[in-house]
Amino acid sequence: MRPLTVMLTAISAALAPQVPAQDLSPAAPIREAVSRIRADMRAMATAIESYYVDCNAYPAWVSADSSESIVQGNSVLAAMPTFRRGILPPGGRCVIPLTLTTPIAYITSLVPDPFNPDVPSTFAYYTDGPGWILLSPGPDGDFDVNPRTVYKSELAQPSAELLVLSYDPTNGTISDGDLWRVRQ
């Protein structure tokens, strides 16, 4: 009788629905947000490159505290470059962003940055003409990278200077460093 019980237990365990293990650690929401940001930056990169194909230039940027900025009043982004408010020139089809969303929807909406608590928020963005960089402050909530000084498209990317300022979860879940994506 004993071998039958062991066999039935083994069969029932094999046939039981498998429930995926959930990560219940306190760091799980931060890891999820980092993964979400990386996926959103890929989507934004596709939109930026699609804009370039149509307009032969990358979307313009302005300082976030400028009246032309799409994120006015955002204290985290205040000194960072970001997308410029959209302007459609007469007879033109390529406008200054919100051009990633209108009049042609390269992306349906600018992606919010979960590590930037101010609303409205999106990623910091900078272009030096031939290249661009998207930035998130990362889990610590402050920007470590100044794209105007660190990002140079004529250098192979990512540059050593950019890598030093990158977020790395092995330094602690909430540690210094920014999340970024560059035109390669």
Image (cartoon, rainbow, N blue to C red):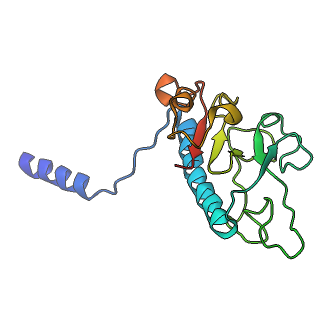
Which residue, as the protein is rendered here, is positioned at the far right? 67
Residue appearing at x 51%, y 38% in the figure = 158
Residue appearing at x 65%, y 41% in the figure = 135
Q: Position of residue 79 (x, y in %)?
A: 81, 33
Q: Nearer the viewer, residue 19 or 49?
A: 49
Q: Nearer the viewer, residue 129 or 174?
A: 129
Q: Position of residue 96 (x, y in %)?
A: 80, 60
Q: How many marks?
A: 0
Q: Position of residue 122 (x, y in %)?
A: 73, 47
**80 w.r.t. 18: above or below:** above
Residue appearing at x 88%, y 68% in the figure = 89
Which residue, as the protein is rendered here, is positioned at the far bottom? 91
Q: Position of residue 150 (x, y in %)?
A: 63, 32
- 24 displayed left or right of 54: left
Q: Nearer the viewer, residue 57 or 171?
A: 57
Q: Nearer the viewer, residue 166 or 116?
A: 166
Q: Quadrant of residue 136?
A: top right
**154 w.r.t. 7: above or below:** above
Residue appearing at x 73%, y 38% in the figure = 116
